Image: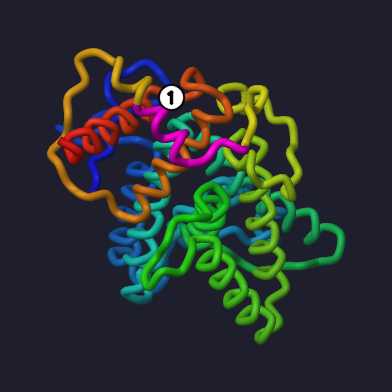
Amino acid sequence: MRSFNMGRFGNSDDPWFRVGTVDVNTTIFVVGVGVLSLLLWAVEGPSHPILGKLVLVPSEVMDGQVWRLFLWPIANEFDSIWVLLLFFVFFQLGSMLEATMGRKLFTTYLVLLALVPAAVVMVFHILVGTNGGVGGLRMMELGVLVGFGLRMPDARFWPGIPAWGIAAGIVVINMVQYLGVRDNFSMLFLATTVVVALIGLRSLGFAEHADWVPRVPLPASGGGAPKQSKSRSTSKRKRRSRANLKVAQAPNAVAPPRRELTKLEEAEMDSILDQVSERGMESLTPQQRKRLEDHSKRLRRGGD
């Protein structure tokens, strides 16, 4: 898997901190906390005196346990091997979204995915008595998957299914399961998560192609807010050529080892090139520039 080096400290693309040689960005931090919660789940035993008090249960929040509104994503259970697959998917897709958005905006995105659905189910609990429980990264992972499908709709998963198709299929499957057991709480939480994932990503300035998604003004979207768009009639080949020509002028760029890009990485580069075409090179984060430089050098070496 591609290494996501966040560079020096001080801007939105730096890691939060380092553990040895590991740069801990938002994605790694969230997955790391999730892994620790699995170990705690195993140590606690069936009663789960700690993790059990983190699950979001509206009736318990109303009794004064307000921390459940914020800490519910930590309450992971190691009830099957699929939990590890969930963490892996979150790490892969979260890393790519964070590479595009920068750690601060990606952190804002995750906070929205955690807090807004929690607030919505609390309102419904107060108004109509809807109650239930949710804990762990599952709902947040679905939100990241939906956001990835919106940001990079051309990305392909095995066996060639587009990202948006995977996201829509998994959301529908979960909705049908919740409907079958009449779990209104989970249906409401999932529906809210999907809405927040779509509107949040567009509002933060990273889904300009999705005109069908409304945009809500967010104070945190300043770094990702779109500038005046250029004509979209430019072909992808011309956009690649123009981007490669500009990147070639960057000094002291260190070329990575030559290898083929995966389909997900190709989709990521296409997304960056589209951003260059629409909003100019100045709209790229330092990490996006580095990725574009590496890809440009790899293409030039391949043509030698």
Its colouring scheme is: rainbow
Q: Is residue 237 left or right of residue 214?
A: left
Tell me which corner region of the image, top left, top right, bottom left or bottom right, holds residue 63: bottom right
Residue wearing tag 1: 285
Which of the image's four quarters has the C terminus? top left
The spot of residue 13 in percent (x, y) is 39, 26
Above/below status of 159 relative to 57: below
Q: Residues within 10 Å of mark 1 (few under 14, many from 20)?
A: some
Q: Is residue 65 visible?
A: no
The spot of residue 295 in percent (x, y) is 28, 36
Q: Confirm whether the magenta stretch covers residue 120.
A: no
Above/below status of 249 relative to 190: above
Check disc 1 and report its element: helix, strand or loop: loop
Write the residue at 47% across / 34% down: 239
Instruction: Give the residue type that dot 1 points to.
Output: Thr
Viewer-nearest residue: 162 or 72: 162
Write the residue at 30% across / 67% down: 42
The spot of residue 186 in percent (x, y) is 65, 69
Viewer-nearest residue: 86 or 114: 86
Q: Which residues are magenta?
A: 233-244
- Judged by its main secondary structure, the magenta piece is helix
Q: Confirm whether the magenta stretch covers residue 236.
A: yes
